Image (cartoon, helix red, strand yellow):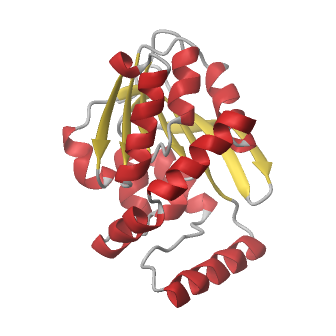
Amino acid sequence: MSYCQCQGIENTFDRRLAEAQLQRERRRGPQRTTLMLVEALRAQGVAGRTLLDIGGGVGAVQRLLLESGAAGVTGIDASSAYLEAARQEARQRGFEPRVRYRHGNFVELAPDIDPADIVTLDRVICCYDDMKGLVTASASKARGVYGVVFPRSAWWTRLGVRLLNLSQRIKGSTFRMFAHSTEDVESLLRAQGLSRIYRRTRGIWQVAVFTRAAGAA
């Protein structure tokens, strides 16, 4: 991820937005696609397993899997405000001893990050200009299960992303969104030994879960 995109994420996903999202989740619960992802992961077994949550935002996936018996979580985010919101919420709910946080660009941090039983990227791929680097590095950390939410490959999705980026440019923000090809993403995951076992769509989003064959590197 480029420096400009990192700065764009830090400036766009600020303390005000983090607090607003956390308050919304407290009132209404996590977004439906997040719940779809978590339900699919629970079907694969969560109890006693470790989670690496990349771009975890205010920590919805982390908390839901910890409630389901996950042994521990590593949460990584390029937004310091979102990471702090996730930390505070984990502390309030008594999960803090089971969670570690890292701030920064995952691709740069990856060499120092331990593998986990489950790896998740909930609406993260669309924030990365270096999709290949992100998907390859994150997939290599998944010992068993890899779950992701990202935009569908459709003309209207690409149009929406262009309009959003135009708005960001007008506002002077360096943050951009990306509608990466589904086939390109899945091809990289297959190259890492992961096979898709679940896919559902909702609006512009698709939710997918991949698993690694037993004994695969």
**Residue shown at 65% from the left, 34% from the top:** 26
Instruction: Say whether residue 22 is left or right of residue 116.
Output: right
Which residue sits furthest left? 112
**Residue shown at 25% from the left, 36% from the top:** 113
Q: Position of residue 18 (x, y in %)?
A: 51, 51
The quadrant the N terminus occupies is bottom left
**Residue shown at 70% from the left, 60% from the top:** 152
Q: Quadrant of residue 168?
A: bottom right
Q: Is residue 109 placed above or below 89 in the rendered structure?
A: below
Instruction: Say whether residue 139 is left or right of residue 190.
Output: left
Q: Is residue 4 placed above or below 151 in the rendered structure?
A: below
Which residue sits furthest bottom? 170
**Residue shown at 42% from the left, 33% from the top:** 88
Q: Nearer the viewer, residue 189 or 14?
A: 14
Q: Quadrant of residue 99?
A: top left
Q: Position of residue 181 (x, y in %)?
A: 60, 65
Q: Does any portion of residue 52 appear in the rendered image?
A: yes
Q: Quadrant of residue 14?
A: bottom left
Q: Nearer the viewer, residue 70 or 7?
A: 7
Q: Does any portion of residue 124 appear in the rendered image?
A: no
Q: Total of numbered circles in the picture? A: 0
Q: Position of residue 155 (x, y in %)?
A: 75, 76
The quadrant the C terminus occupies is top left
Instruction: Say whether residue 202 is left or right of residue 68.
Output: right
Q: Nearer the viewer, residue 152 or 96?
A: 96
Q: Position of residue 193 (x, y in %)?
A: 45, 38
